[in-house]
Image (cartoon, rainbow, N blue to C red):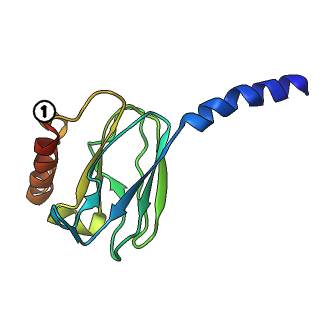
Amino acid sequence: MLLRAALFACLLPCAALAEVHEVKMLNRNDTGPMPFEPDYLVIKPGDTVKFLATDPGHNAATIAGMIPEGGKKFIGKINQEIEVTLDAEGIWGVKCSPHYTMGMVMLIQVGDKPATAADLPDDLPPAARQRMEEILARRAP
């Protein structure tokens, strides 16, 4: 019993270090129509991202080809919040399924390596590619 208590006490500080990051799913903001806000997140492995159903008609889902090795795809329901814990380091692409072709996308950097144009798959819809390139341009030093 004492061993279990000690093990539990050792695990508590690790859980306490994980953060929850909130992302709004919006119809419009200062970057234009159909954005995630923020549209680029830098998090640590084990952090959670909570997608908020701020405006109606949106969801959050992984983009095929933009899931780091060891990561698992996710897809939220329309008009519902979803929380995902991301452990796999790398660049995660996220889309709103109904507005993907309109460019409703975002990038999540898990770990220290920032996203580059090389992380974007060739088969992105044109508006999604343009939005991601704009995101990357804003982040460039």
Q: Which residue is mark 1?
A: 141
Helix, strand or loop at disc 1? loop
- Above or below: residue 69 compared with residue 134: above
Instruction: Count residues near mark 1 (Cα–Cα under 10 Å), then give few for <14, some for 14-19, many for 20+.
Output: few
The C terminus: image quadrant: top left
- Residue 123 visible, this angle: no
The answer to whether 8 appears left or right of 39 in the picture is right
Q: Which is more toward the observer, 105 or 69?
A: 105
Location of the N terminus (image quadrant): top right
Lateral position of residue 9 relative to residue 72, left or right: right
Instruction: Judge by depth and name the residue closer to the eye, 34 or 92.
Output: 34
Residue at image location 13% in from the left, 56% down from the top? 125
In the rendered image, residue 46, in percent from the top left (x then y), is placed at: 50, 36
How many marks the image carries: the answer is 1
Residues 30 and 6: in front is 30
- Which image quadrant is residue 23 in? bottom left
Residue at image position (39%, 71%) is 78
x, y percentage for residue 122?
Answer: 12, 44
Residue 28: x, y in percent? 21, 70
Q: Amino acid at mark 1?
A: Pro
**Picture quadrant of residue 8:** top right
Kindly tell me whether residue 109 is visible in this rendering.
yes
- Taking depth in this image into account, of 72 and 82 the one nearest to the observer is 82
Residue drawn at 45 percent across, 33 percent down:
45
Outermost bottom residue: 56
Q: Residue 81 at x, y = what percent?
A: 46, 65
Residue 26, above or below 127: below
Instruction: State left or right for residue 90 relative to residue 21.
Output: left
